Image: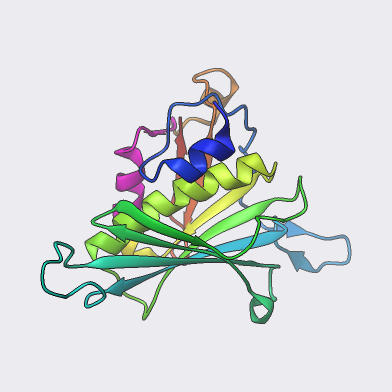
């Protein structure tokens, strides 16, 4: 199956594909020789959710609420140089539309962090479903462009709900015993998921 063709023609979930993707990379911060601390990834791909409660409130419309996810990317510590990538619209967690702003043109081979944010700092259950869907869609984009996902960063307040939503889409929680990674399971896609502050971590695989 052509991943680019699937990416543009299907707007729900992620298919069972053999994505020969090696993503089990450490999320710990790396220390440089001069003592400076650097990020373990080259790019941040930011997914910011926003509710649009009145967007489609007109006579005859069956849509009551729409969630928008704005996707942009920037180099670590250079958020002021953020570049818009695409806009996604969801209804109750199901993809409803997409507006592409540019090609996903990060340098191939460079690692990324998928970072979820919520406009205003809080989120609805529908936004959390949209965030989970968007994370999986961006996982495909990074695969196509040969960018390994080093980390997925989630807000503390929505962490558990987004993780649960991703598992409901066919992912499993990896064994907690590190030895199991040497042969306890096989995976086409691994997501190392971290909370933004409290140090929660979940490894999901499919």
- Closest to the observer, 182 or 166: 166
Tell me which corner region of the image, top left, top right, bottom left or bottom right, holds residue 125. bottom left
- Closest to the observer, 141 or 198: 141
- Closest to the observer, 29 or 148: 148
Q: Is residue 4 above or below residue 78?
A: above
Give the residue at the far top of this rendering: 183
Q: Is residue 7 left or right of residue 83?
A: left
Q: Quadrant of the N terminus?
A: top right
**Can the viewer see residue 171?**
yes
Residue 167 included in the magenta stretch of the image? yes
Residue at 46 percent of width and 51 percent of height: 135
**Can the viewer see residue 160?**
no
Q: Is residue 92 left or right of residue 180?
A: left
Q: How many marks?
A: 0
Which residue range is magenta in the image?
161-175
Tell me which corner region of the image, top left, top right, bottom left or bottom right, holds residue 3. top right
Q: Is residue 97 above or below residue 206?
A: below
**Figure coloring:** rainbow
Q: Is residue 174 above or below residue 201?
A: above
Q: Position of residue 38 (x, y in %)?
A: 74, 64
Give the residue at the far right of this rendering: 34
Tell me which corner region of the image, top left, top right, bottom left or bottom right, holds residue 65. bottom left
Residue at 35 percent of width and 43 percent of height: 12
Q: Position of residue 49 (x, y in %)?
A: 39, 68
Residue 112 included in the magenta stretch of the image? no
Q: Position of residue 102 (x, y in %)?
A: 63, 62
């Amino acid at each position: 199956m052509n991943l680019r063709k699937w990416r543009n023609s299907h707007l729900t979930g992620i298919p069972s594909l053999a994505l020969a993707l090696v993503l089990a990379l450490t999320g710990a911060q790396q220390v440089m020789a001069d003592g400076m601390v650097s990020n373990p990834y080259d790019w941040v791909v930011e997914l910011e959710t926003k509710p649009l409660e009145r967007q489609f409130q007109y006579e005859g419309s069956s849509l009551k609420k729409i969630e928008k996810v704005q996707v942009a990317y920037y180099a670590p510590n250079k958020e002021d140089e953020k570049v818009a990538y695409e806009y996604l619209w969801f209804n109750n967690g199901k993809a409803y539309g997409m507006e592409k702003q540019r090609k996903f043109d990060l340098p191939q081979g460079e690692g990324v962090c998928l970072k979820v944010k919520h406009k205003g700092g809080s989120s609805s259950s529908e936004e959390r479903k949209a965030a989970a869907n968007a994370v999986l869609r961006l996982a495909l984009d990074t695969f196509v462009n040969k960018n390994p996902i080093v980390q997925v960063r989630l807000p503390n307040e929505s962490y558990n709900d987004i993780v649960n939503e991703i598992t409901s889409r066919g992912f499993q929680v990896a064994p907690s015993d590190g030895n199991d990674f040497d042969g306890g399971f096989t995976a086409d896609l691994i997501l190392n998921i971290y909370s933004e502050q409290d140090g929660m971590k979940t490894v999901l695989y499919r």
